Amino acid sequence: MLDRDGFRPNVGIILLNQKNQVFWGKRIRTHSWQFPQGGIDRGETPEQAMYRELHEEVGLMPEHVRVLARTRDWLRYEVPDRYIRRDARGHYKGQKQIWYLLHLVGHDWHLNLRATDHPEFDAWRWNDYWVPLDVVVEFKRGVYEMALTELSRYLPRQDPRNRYLRGGMRARDADACETFLPHMPGAGLELPPGATFEPDPQSAVARAGEEDQHASR
């Protein structure tokens, strides 16, 4: 389902815990990290799609979260042509997203990466709100920055020392973010039953392109 400009409607989810840390998921069989997101089906509202994706990707139900805010308008990113199926080129351009900021009122044990037969993530962690965007596929980084910035005004009052790491990690932050480094793929991460950290020959960018190829159908 594309709009007249070739963008598929989509929702993104920024999930907070009690410390204002965000859920950060590792895409299955890659070293790429991202927030939960997914397409809006025909006949769905963005909020209905958000709750469906929340359950499908991280196993949470509506009673496990509280909605704090959403972006005022669509945020768009274009997908490079090389990641678009040949028969969709000229029609599909990318995603337009409504982003939701949610507060977890349940517990960590309610999170379940295997809620469906087609999991999106094979590991997760809590990370500072201003996540390091160098672990996000490049063509999505602008939207992530816009969503985090717009929704930051709705954060519950917490320690204000979080900083935005635009281009990478500062040395003093390295210890806190060590699980993002490729040579330490398993440190400090939560694994669902049956998940491993076996490396996958596909690159993270290729996997992200595969996701957006699927979205262009």
Image: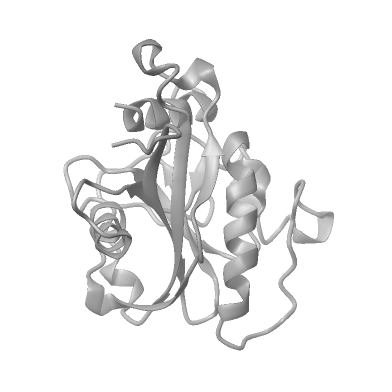
Location of residue 7 (image quadrant): top left
Tell me residue 187's x, y (percent). 54, 51
- Name above or below for residue 175 compared with residue 156: above
Q: Viewed as shown, does residue 187 lie left or right of 173?
A: left
Q: Quadrant of the C terminus?
A: top left
Q: Quadrant of the N terminus?
A: top left
Residue projecting furthest to the bottom: 157
Residue that appears at 24% across and 73% down: 62
Residue projecting furthest to the front: 4
Residue projecting furthest to the right: 171
Q: Viewed as shown, does residue 144 lie left or right of 161?
A: left
Q: Nearer the viewer, residue 193 or 159?
A: 159
Tell me residue 197's x, y (percent). 42, 38
Tell me residue 210's x, y (percent). 40, 26
Question: Can residue 128 be spotted in the picture?
Answer: no
Tell me residue 25's x, y (percent). 44, 51
